[in-house]
Image (cartoon, helix red, strand yellow):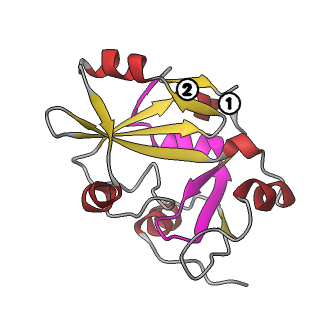
Amino acid sequence: MTDIVSSPVSVLLQNRNVPFEQIVIPLSPDKKPIRALEEILGELGFLPGSVVRSILFRTDAESYILLAIAGSNKADWGVLRKHLNERRLTLADPSQVVEHTGYVIGAVPPLALPESIRVLADESLRTYEKLIIGSGVLGYAFGLSGAAVCELMKDAEFGLFGKATE
């Protein structure tokens, strides 16, 4: 049995007795995935769109918002700006992602985040039986039930924040 990578996410899942599986994503020396994530997930029985993308936005007021959305969808910027009552949103740059979430791009989970991060969750998450979330450690992800992810995110603001990709 492979040891479970230690992160705030794995600690949260274990403390709440949430069953999950660890998915190893082989990385090259420059920390890029060697194989396509969709290929790995297909072999494990996960749907390609079941990857939860955790996208960090910065507002004009210098606050940070994380949108958790199923990989089969993309953020609807107009809907986000209207919901947040913001005229302008920008994607956080990699250094801001680390500074404000504590995680690197490619490993950011939709849970176990600092309290200063406002979390929005797209309704697309509710449509998957199984979801893949960032583990908090590059090269690893966690697969768990969609219902468990949504329950753990019950304090997030759920809404229609995305649109299907073409």
What is the number of the mark on residue 105? none
**Vertical order, 73 against 113 (above or below):** above
Q: Is residue 142 magenta?
A: yes
Residue 152 lies, in percent from the top left, at: 48, 46
Residue at 56% in and 31% down: 74
Name the residue located 24 percent from the left edge and 49 percent from the top edge: 115
Quadrant in which the C terminus is drawn: top right
Quarter of the rendering occupied by the N terminus:
bottom right
Where does residue 106 sit, x and y in percent of width and height?
A: 51, 60
Which residue is labeled 1 in the image? 127
Dot 1 amino acid type: Thr
Q: In which quarter of the image is residue 40?
A: bottom right
Disc 2: which residue = 123
Answer with left or right where residue 44 lies relative to residue 153.
right
Q: What element carries label 2?
A: helix
Q: Does the magenta stretch include residue 86?
A: no
Provide residue 84's location: percent of width, then percent of height: 28, 22
What distance separates the C-alpha of mark 2 from that of mark 1?
A: 7 Å
Q: What stretch is highlighted in magenta?
A: 132-159
Q: Residues within 10 Å of mark 1 (few under 14, many from 20)?
A: few
> What residue is rendered at 52% in x and 67% in y?
14
Quarter of the rendering containing residue 100: bottom left
- Tell whether label 1 touches label 2 (CB within 8 Å): yes
In the structure shown, which secondary structural element does the residue marked by tag 1 occupy? Answer: helix
The disc labelled 2 sits on which kind of residue? Glu
| Extreme residue in the left direction | 61
82 and 4: which is toward the camera: 82
Residue 44 picture location, percent across and down:
82, 60
| Front residue (pair 42, 78) | 78
Label 2: how many Cα within 10 Å (few below 14, some 14–19, many 20+): some
- Tell me which residue sits at (25%, 25%) in the image: 88
